[in-house]
Amino acid sequence: MSAEEIIDIVDENDRVVGRSPRGEAYERGLRHRCAFVLARDAGGRILVHRRTPTKLVFPSLYDMFVGGVVGAGESYDEAALREAEEELGVSGLPRPEYAFTFRYDGEGGRSWWSAVYEVRCDGSVRPQAEEVEWWDFLSEAELERRLGEWEWTPDGVAAYERFKAYRAGRSAEG
């Protein structure tokens, strides 16, 4: 999605209150929507990548989610599938499984609503060179170890911590 593409602007309750070009929304700190997709391979390992230095938000940082900004009029579910297929360089992915939504409130007043998903990608991936500088599938243990060593996107870390708690709560129920 380019800086000129139009996105929905939302309030503190995730209700659409307007529209704006993405670049302007970032510049002005307008609250918007994002989809985060945790992609696993057939062995259950998680795709981890390093963002390119040209990214508008969190350039050159590591992330354990693929995804991005929800377009104007687009649903979280539509954005999750679109973004996952685009960033992974695949087509025909199963619909990502919705987990939960939370509001990310970061430094400098940055805030966005984030819907978190999970998807299994059994085929080979070809991440977008414009988006992804490096990537690999890591076991959860290796990902946990790298959390203390690499510089990560703060929204990705917030989503991952919530995802682990969500998953633990689901396994305690079942």
Image (tube, rainbow, N blue to C red):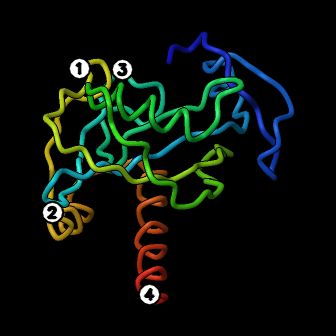
| Residue in view at x 56 percent, y 41 percent | 77
- Residue 139 is labelled as 2
Which callout, 3 or 4, points at the residue further toward the start of the chain? 3
For the image shown, how many numbered marks are present on the structure?
4
| Rendering coords of residue 127 (x, y %) | 23, 28
Q: On residue 129, which mark appears?
A: 1
Residue type of the residue flagged with mark 3: Thr
Q: Are marks 1 and 2 in contact (CB under 8 Å)?
A: no
Q: Mark 4 = which residue?
A: 174
Select label 3 or label 1 by which is in front: 1
Q: Earlier in the sequence, mark 4 or mark 2?
A: 2
User: Which mark is drawn over residue 54?
Assistant: 3
Is residue 136 found left or right of 71 in the rendered image? left
Q: Residue at x 82, y 36 (%)?
A: 16
Amino acid carrying mark 1 in the image: Ala
- Residue 64 horizontal/vertical position (percent): 31, 50
Query: Which amino acid, mark 4?
Result: Gly
Whether the residues at callouts 3 and 2 have beta carbons within 8 Å, the answer is: no
| Residue 131 location, quadrant | top left
Distance from disc 3 to disc 1, alpha carbons, whole Å, reads 11 Å
The x, y position of residue 94, in whole percent, is 36, 42
| Dot 3 or dot 2, earlier in sequence | 3
